[in-house]
Amino acid sequence: MRFTRRLPHSPDKVWRAVTEAEHLEAWFPHQIVGEWVVGAPLRFVSQFGDFDGEVVAFQPPSWAPGERWRELNGSYVERFGPQAATIGPPEDGEEKVLAR
């Protein structure tokens, strides 16, 4: 499954929206309990059921090269998948990887 959304916001604003509780609660159905440190366990809690995860990469707000992306009308792209969450501005044709 792939979820893609066009976001007309800066990478910093998007970063806060996906990592800070006060911003997550506006759009994400789970409360994320844990510390944003590589290797740390995360607990996702909601009325829909809870599940566990792990922080496998966290470099705020730096980006790792290597994946390609496409520009969508000049907007930033956020993509969540089973292995990665990516956020990237339409520059140099590079996709910016936040977490794997």
Image: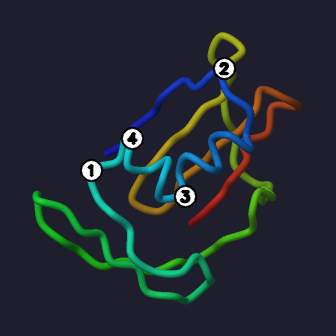
Could you classify mark 2 by the number of other residues whose Cα lies within 10 Å: few (under 14), some (14-19), or many (20 or more)? some
From the image, state whether disc 4 or disc 1 is nearer to you.
4
Of the residues under marks 4 and 3, which one precedes in the sequence?
3
* Distance in Å between CA atoms under marks 4 and 2: 20 Å
Q: Which residue is mark 3?
A: 20
The part of the image, by quadrant, that contains residue 70 is top right
Give the labeled residue for mark 2. 75
Q: Mark 2 and mark 4 in contact (Cβ < 8 Å)?
A: no
User: Disc 3 on helix, strand or loop?
Assistant: loop
- Kindly identify the residue that appears in the image at 64 percent across and 43 percent down: 87
Which label sits on residue 26? 4
As drawn, is 17 to the left or to the right of 88?
Answer: left
Residue farthest to the left? 48
Category of crowding for the residue at label 4, using alpha-carbon neighbours closer than 10 angstroms: few (below 14), some (14–19), many (at least 20): few
Which of marks 3 and 2 precedes in the sequence? 3
- Residue type at mark 1 is Pro
Residue type at mark 2?
Answer: Ser
Percent coordinates x, y for residue 64 in the rendering = 78, 60
Q: CA distance from mark 1 to mark 2?
A: 24 Å
Looking at this view, name the residue that lies furthest to the right.
92
Distance, label 2 to label 3, CA atoms, is 22 Å
Label 1 belongs to which residue? 29
Q: Position of residue 12 (x, y in %)?
A: 74, 44
Frontmost of labels 2 and 3 is: 3
What's the CA distance linking mark 3 and mark 1?
14 Å
Callouts 4 and 1 close, C-beta under 8 Å: no
The residue under label 3 is which amino acid type?
Answer: Glu
